[in-house]
Amino acid sequence: MSDTNPKSEPFSNAEKDPDDWTTGGEAMTGAQASYLKTLSEEAHEEFDDSLTKADASKKIDELQAKTGRGQ
């Protein structure tokens, strides 16, 4: 058994590239869709409701940078 406490390094695996998600090809979640719609409106961009979980995550990151949200 390992002496390492996973809670002592909470960020070691906190961010995984969306391209590596095992469920990344599934439809985006309701929470992603809701937030993405809000960000799209603020950024004056069209909301795409057909994105996968992984693509929605990437788009959210892009629009957060564009709108200044999530900083």
Image: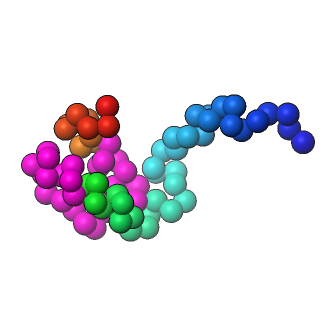
x then y, percent, for residue 18: 45, 50
Residue depicted at x 18% and y 59%: 47
Residue at the farthest right position: 1
17 sits to left or right of 71: right
Is residue 15 rendered magenta in the image?
no
From the top left corner, tell me how far across and down residue 67 is, in percent. Answer: 19, 38
- Horizontal side, residue 36 vs residue 18: left or right: left
- Percent across and percent down for residue 64 are 27, 40
At 66% from the left edge and 31% from the top edge, which residue is drawn? 9
Residue 26, compared with residue 13, is above or below; it is: below
Which span is picked out in magenta?
37-61
Q: Residue at x 37, y 51 (%)?
A: 57
Quarter of the figure that contains the N terminus = top right
Residue 46, placed above or below residue 17: below
Left or right, residue 27 beside residue 14: left
Q: Quadrant of the C terminus?
A: top left
Residue depicted at x 32% and y 42%:
61
Q: Is residue 71 left or right of residue 4?
A: left
Q: Is residue 40 magenta?
A: yes
Question: Is residue 34 visible from the viewing direction of this image?
Answer: yes
Tell which of 10 and 16 is nearer to you.
Answer: 10
**Residue 52 in view:** no
Q: How is the image coloured?
A: rainbow
